[in-house]
Image (cartoon, rainbow, N blue to C red):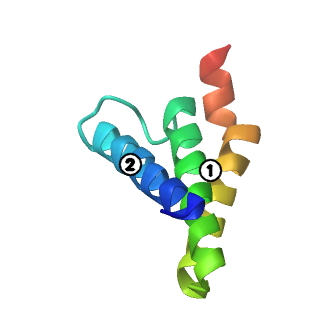
């Protein structure tokens, strides 16, 4: 099995675990845990999509990962106030 395929399976498991935890109320979609899991999972899936030339999926995954990373680096102001 190719390394990118292994990464894609790992990414799929991570994204699904984050989504399942969020829908069950275990984590918030704005929590650092959720955002890190989504960023990692989508990045892994994006690599595989890029390598195989699945451009629509590569673009979607890349944007999804970028939004997760952006949200980690620059959380909404109300989230910062809650931390204080």
Look at the picture and state if 43 lies above or below 80: below
Label 1, label 2: how far apart the Cα atoms are: 17 Å
Q: Is residue 74 visible?
A: no
Q: Residue drawn at (43%, 45%), measured in percent from left and top?
A: 14
The mark closer to the camera, 1 or 2, is 2
Estimate how packed mark 2 is, as few (under 14), some (14 to 19) or many (20 or more) residues with alpha carbons within 10 Å.
some
**Residue at horizontal 46 percent and vertical 49 percent from the top:** 10
User: Disc number at residue 24?
Assistant: none
Residue 50 falls left or right of residue 41: right
In the image, 64 versus 47, the foreground residue is: 47
Residue placed under numbered mark 2 in the picture: 13
Q: Residue at x 66, y 41 (%)?
A: 76
Query: In this view of the protein, can residue 48 be seen by the observer?
Result: yes
The residue shown at (59%, 21%) is: 82
Instruction: Check the picture and name the quadrant holding the C terminus.
Output: top right
Vertical relation: 9 (above or below) 40: below
- Element type where label 1 sits in the image: helix
Of helix, strand and loop, which one carries label 2? helix
Viewer-side residue, 16 vs 4 = 4
Residue 46 image position (x, y, % from top left): 60, 67
Q: Earlier in the sequence, mark 1 or mark 2?
A: 2
- Residue 38 on image: x %, y %: 52, 48
**Looking at the picture, does residue 37 appear above or below residue 3?**
above
Point out residue 6 in the picture as x, y percentages from the top left corner: 49, 55
Residue farthest toward the right in the current orientation of the protein: 73
Q: Which residue is disc 1 drawn over? A: 68
């Amino acid at each position: 099995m190719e390394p990118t395929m292994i990464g894609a399976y790992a990414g799929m498991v991570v994204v699904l675990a984050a989504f399942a935890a969020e829908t069950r109320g275990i984590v918030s979609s704005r929590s650092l845990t959720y955002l890190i899991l989504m960023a990692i999972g989508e990045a892994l899936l994006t690599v595989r999509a890029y390598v195989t030339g699945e451009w629509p999926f590569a673009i979607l995954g890349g944007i999804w990962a970028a939004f997760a990373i952006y949200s980690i680096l620059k959380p909404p102001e109300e989230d910062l106030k809650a931390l204080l």
